[in-house]
Each structure stands twice: as C-alpha cells, then as structure tokens.
Amino acid sequence: MSEQELQELEKVFNQKITDDVRIEPKDWMPEKYRKTHIRQISQHAHSEIIGQLPEGNWITRAPSLRRKVALLAKIQDEAGHGLYLYSACETLGISREELLDQLHTGKAKYSSIFNYPAVTWADMGAIGWLVDGAAIINQIPLMNTSYGPYARAMVRVCKEESFHQRQGFEIMLTLTEGSEEQKEMAQDALNRWWWPALMMLGPRDADSPNTAQSMKWKLKRKTNDELRQQFIDQTVPQAELIGLTIPDPDLKWNEERQSYDSGAIDWDEFWQVVKGHGPCNKVRMEARIAAHENGSWVREAANAYAQKHSKK
Ligand code: BYC
C-alpha cells in the first residue's frame, strides 16, 4: 500500500472517531488501536473468567437455597460475559487459543481484585456490591466505546452486572439487619474489599500509560480517577444507609466540589498484586489452568462433532 493510500485510510478512521461512528471488524484501523483493544478486551474477558473463582468457593456453602440459586446464576452470567468478550476480541484477528495461552502463561493480565480471598459469606455480598458496583461504573461508558463489538457486548453485560450489584447489596443489607456477629461480618468484608475495589479501577491517571491514547480513540470515555471518584460518591451513601463505615478515616464530604475527598490508596500493594504477588495469584492461576486441562475432552468432542457435521 502506498504512503498516500495509508494516509487516506487513517484520515477516514480519524473522521469516524471524531464523528462517533463505530469502528467495525472489517474497517481499516491503526495497528496500535487493534493491539490496545486486544489488550483491554482480553484483560476484561480473563477477569470475568477468573472472577468466577472467589465466588465458586461459596456455592456449596451458601446459607439457603435461594442464595445458592442466585450465586450460581451470577457465576454463570460471568462465564457468559467472558465468552462475549472473547468473541469480540477474536474479531480483531486473534484466536481463542492464543488468548487463553496468554492468560495461562502470565503474559496477559486480569483484574487485581480477584487475587484477594473470599473468606466469609459476607464477601459474596461485598463482591456483588463493591466489585460489580465498580465494574458497572467502569463499563457503562464502555457501551459507548468506539469499537462496535466491544460496545455491543457491554449492553447486556451492564444489565446483568446491575442485577449482581443489587443482589450483593441485598446480602449486605440482610446481614446488617441480623445479629451482632452478622453485622460485624458485613463490616469486616467492607473493610477488606473497599481498598482493592478502589484499586480495581486502575492506577492514578498520572501513572496510567494507556489512558491518554485510549481517551483519544474513545476506547475509554472516562479516566481511571474520574471513575474512582464516581464510585466513591455513589457508594458512601449506600454504606451509610445500611449502617456500615467506610474504612477510610480521611473520607470527608467536600462542599465546594460536591464530592468526597478520600484517603491515600496503597499503590505499592496494587502493583505487587498486578505483578503476581497478591494473596491468591498463584491459586487462581493453578485453578484456571487445571479447569482448562480438565476440559480438554469437551473441546475435543466438540471439534470431532463439528468435523463430522461439516462432512455431511
Ligand atoms: N488489575 O494504563 P492503565 C467483573 C494494568 S470483571 C490488573 O490505566 P488501561 C466481575 C493495565 O492493564 C471486570 N491490571 O491501563 C467479574 C496496564 O498494564 P499493561 C473487569 C491492571 O487499560 C466477576 C497497566 O496496569 N473490568 O466485573 O488504560 C465477578 C497500566 O494501567 C488493573 C475490566 O477489565 C487492574 N485493576 O486501564 C464480579 C474493564 N488496572 O497491559 C465482577 C475493562 C490497570 O499496559 N478495562 N492494570 O501491561 C478497563 O477499563 C481498563 O483496562 C482499566 C485499566 C481501567 C482496568
């Protein structure tokens, strides 16, 4: 392709971004745009799949049949989200095998939040309320992201996440209305998940190498710090409503900004977890790889079936 043709294609691409016209799989796109999307969409897909593990731990110990059914449905939704996202990612010219290989060899990241343990039933409430709550705040702007398949996948994901957030909040509400021990359990879960939930939204804008370019491409519509502030402002009144205390002594309403000021996040902890040294990184990867290996017979059977039918 000549230099002039390339410039023409780039001009058309940039105009689409300016006019909010979605980029579709067969459209020309800069290589860096494609790679950045593969990175973010695959990290998102991997997070949904690994995110099933802390909750899977509680299926057999859910305190009632109703809770068990809701938890199972939530975990199934997460598997579904992973599948839409892998499919969206494949439209960028990478295979499912390669994506999974990147996860299993540690080349691709998944969300830091899933490297923390779920030690009590209240953690199922805190994960739904805080983790899905933060995920919705991050994902609603992604329904408007510039890459068509990613934006469309987000519509259903956001609807389902909002159901997850409510069921998590309802678990917390029930615990806070229960015995003193149950209330303590809810507060303890909030204490342990609050800071990791804030970290989940990514590093400070000043330390985020990808944000500036992703905002220009309209992959990201809001920066990490903007989303974090929105999450804090939305969640603090919810905690107050159910009589729980946010574990941040510096949290204070700022009348002028009409927003909360909050304490410092331990970014060293965040980077340690991202680099693989969180409390559960090792067990999460071991469980994921074992699930993949144990499922090889399903893939073989599906391929054999597809081959048999393609010959008919
Ligand atoms: N954890 O330049 P930055 C769910 C990495 S699952 C680990 O700000 P970006 C759910 C980042 O990849 C929802 N790594 O990056 C499921 C980059 O590294 P590389 C998960 C992180 O991409 C089950 C470096 O740090 N949601 O809801 O512009 C049960 C610098 O960061 C993290 C998504 O994946 C992290 N938290 O912004 C319950 C949403 N943060 O690749 C619930 C889609 C950053 O350059 N993703 N890093 O080596 C995004 O919106 C963006 O990718 C992020 C980061 C805001 C997360």
Image (cartoon, rainbow, N blue to C red):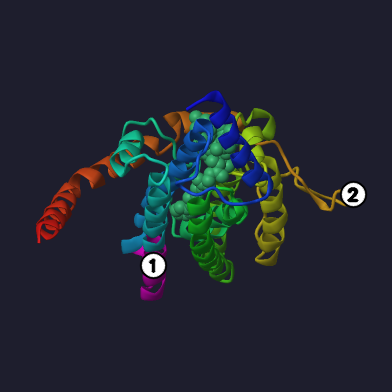
Q: Is residue 136 magenta?
A: no
Residue on which the image places disc 2: 256
Whether residue 116 is visible: no
x 73%, y 54%: residue: 233
Callout 2: 10 Å neighbours few (<14), some, many (20+)? few
Range of residues picked out in magenta:
61-75
- Does residue 176 sit above or below 284 in this rendering? below
Instruction: Kindly give the residue lying farthest to the bottom in the view shown.
Output: 66
Whether residue 90 is visible: yes
**Which dot marks residue 308?**
none
Residue 8 at x, y percent in the picture: 59, 34
Residue on which the image places disc 1: 73
Residue 165 at x, y percent in the picture: 54, 63
- Identify the amino acid type marked 1: Ala
Q: Nearer the viewer, residue 161 or 187?
A: 161
- Does residue 109 sit above or below 57 in this rendering? above
